[in-house]
Image: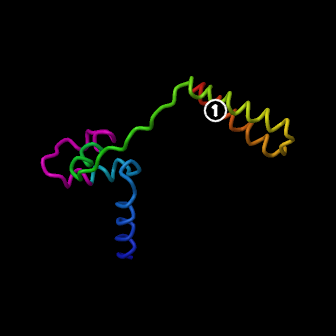
Amino acid sequence: MAEKKKKERKEKKEKPLEKWTVKELREEALKIEGVQGVHGMNKEELLQIVRQAKGIAPPEKKKSVSVREIKQKVSELRQVRDQERKEGASRARLNILRKKISGLKRQTRS
């Protein structure tokens, strides 16, 4: 039974910091010298402290795509869809293109 708990702890350490619970982050932050007020911190603050202590760089933010670029992709996909429709593409292929277009349009609204 003791081996099982050790294994579970080891598995928790292997997952990325963003997936750790606040409780796990607090436990880790308490091990760091010179850190005070751990129990009053939120998850983002705890993540910063643990990353600094371990020397881990924060993850890069995803580059957001502008609405103009998304609309350009939609128009390109519509042209491809119309071309393939003329050439007699299968119904499944046309559905794939339709779903891609719908997904991109959804992105412009969010």
Q: Quadrant of residue 107?
A: top right
Give the extent of the magenta segment.
28-46
Which residue is found at the position 38% from the left and 70% from the top?
A: 7
Between residues 3 and 64, which one lies in front from this camera angle? 64
Q: Residue at x 28, y 50 (%)?
A: 56
Residue 68 on image: x %, y %: 57, 23
Which residue is at 41% across, 50% downward? 19
The verdict on residue 39 being magenta is yes
Q: Is residue 5 left or right of residue 108?
A: left
Please, which colouring scheme is shown? Answer: rainbow
| Local SS, label 1 | helix
Q: Split into 4 quadrants, where in the image is the N terminus?
A: bottom left
Residue 37 occupies which quadrant of the picture? top left
Front residue of 23/63: it is: 63
Q: Residues within 10 Å of mark 1 (few under 14, many from 20)?
A: some
- Residue at x 27% of width, y 48% of height: 51
Q: Is residue 9 left or right of residue 31?
A: right
Q: Quadrant of the C terminus?
A: top right
Name the one closer to the observer, 41 or 17.
17
- The location of residue 83, given as percent across then percent down, is 79, 35
